[in-house]
Image: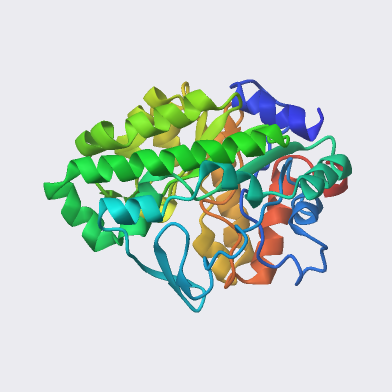
């Protein structure tokens, strides 16, 4: 099978020739490993998918210092708070939907598709309405408003849903065959809000996003979101990414309960890639394969390849992926 065929077969709960490897965010170490760009990194490390390139909105202060176009406050590249508190704030910190096109360079996107025509082209970013809302307001303010002003929170969620749809529709128009919706909703002991409140506030937003896109949508979230997975199915998500083991998510149990309806992606423990034990990395990759494969499963870490990881362990992870999926030569992908 071609890499694209592996991914699409798995997303349809079929049986690909090899378990697809689908690391979503792989930006860290691209230059350290001597690779020209993120797309090249996906291919060099044997992934069956390639992220389409994107860029910040022109003039954005996101990941810099200041208040960005959505009301998030940044300091020296780190998020620190949100400022959205009133309906006027919401109107001010809601960019026109037409600006979503500015997140992409169509020439750069087309170039990646030409370079890697056999890979699955996808786009993923953290613009999910729930996460976007609590970042825009700041977590403390957001949680307090859940108690006394659900109308305002609902309006903010709707605005961020509109933006997510506009952005992802643009990505699909440029060739994205799969969308990964980053919408972090959990901590190590459960979801950030109750399933009852999630059903009322967030499920309608997720339904809108999935219905607006003609391609499979995978929901990414850190933390223990097990109690929210029934609503992931109701929303129409094709699959879910993350399944964080350090939050107590057991892949085998999730597979048994939800695997017939949701494609599962992830579960390799990123903490091991920050350590120094190659054997432990290999063992965890093998565990994830045993518990998740062969059908309806995409192999990846439970989060991403991020700065601070041990480069040697990152290489060990990709090597283990190749060997344990039966594809010891990444060049064949």
153 vs 265, nearest the viewer:
153
Residue 162 showing in the rendered view: yes
Q: Is residue 201 left or right of residue 130?
A: left
Quadrant placement of the N terminus: top right
Q: Is residue 50 above or below residue 76?
A: above
174 vs 260, nearest the viewer:
174
Q: Is residue 151 above or below residue 278?
A: above
Q: Position of residue 71 (x, y in %)?
A: 39, 61
What residue is rendered at 18% in x and 48% in y?
146
Residue 219 showing in the rendered view: no
Q: Is residue 4 left or right of residue 271?
A: right
Q: Position of residue 15 (x, y in %)?
A: 66, 22
Q: Quadrant of residue 289?
A: top right
Quadrant placement of the C terminus: top right
67 vs 130, nearest the viewer:
67
Give the residue at the far bottom of this rendering.
76
Q: Is residue 2 left or right of residue 51?
A: right
Give the residue at the far left of this rendering.
148
Q: Is residue 179 left or right of residue 257?
A: right
Q: Position of residue 188 (x, y in %)?
A: 32, 55
105 vs 59, nearest the viewer:
59
Q: Position of residue 322 (x, y in %)?
A: 74, 47
What residue is rendered at 74% in x and 57% in y?
38
């Amino acid at each position: 099978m071609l890499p694209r065929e592996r991914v699409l077969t798995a997303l349809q709960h079929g049986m690909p020739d090899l378990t697809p490897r689908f690391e979503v965010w792989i930006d860290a170490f691209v230059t350290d490993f001597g690779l020209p760009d993120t797309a090249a990194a996906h291919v060099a490390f044997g992934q069956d998918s390639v992220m389409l390139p994107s860029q910040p909105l022109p003039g954005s202060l996101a990941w810099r210092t200041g208040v960005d176009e959505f009301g998030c406050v940044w300091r020296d590249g780190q998020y620190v708070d949100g400022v959205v508190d009133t309906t006027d704030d919401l109107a001010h910190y809601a960019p026109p939907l037409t600006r979503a096109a500015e997140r992409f360079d169509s020439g750069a996107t087309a170039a990646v598709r030409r370079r890697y025509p056999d890979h699955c082209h996808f786009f993923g970013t953290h613009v999910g309405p729930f996460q976007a809302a609590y970042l825009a307001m700041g977590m403390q303010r957001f949680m307090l408003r859940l108690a006394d002003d659900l109308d305002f929170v609902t309006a903010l969620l709707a605005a961020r849903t509109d933006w997510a749809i506009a952005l992802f529709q643009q990505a699909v128009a440029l060739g994205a065959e799969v969308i990964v919706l980053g919408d972090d909703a959990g901590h190590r002991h459960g979801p950030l809000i109750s399933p009852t409140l999630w059903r009322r506030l967030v499920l309608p937003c997720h339904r809108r996003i999935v219905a607006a896109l003609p391609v499979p949508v995978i929901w990414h979230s850190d933390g223990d979101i097990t109690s929210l997975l029934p609503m992931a199915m109701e929303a129409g998500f094709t699959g879910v990414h993350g399944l964080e083991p350090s939050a107590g998510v057991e892949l085998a149990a999730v597979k048994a309960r939800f695997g017939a309806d949701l494609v599962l992606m992830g579960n390799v423990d990123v903490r091991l890639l920050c350590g120094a034990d190659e054997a432990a990395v290999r063992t965890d990759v093998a565990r994830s394969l045993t518990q998740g494969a062969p059908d309806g499963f995409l192999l990846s870490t439970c989060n991403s390849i991020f700065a601070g990881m041990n480069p040697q362990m990152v290489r060990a992870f990709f090597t283990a992926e190749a060997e344990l999926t039966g594809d010891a030569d990444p060049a064949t992908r």
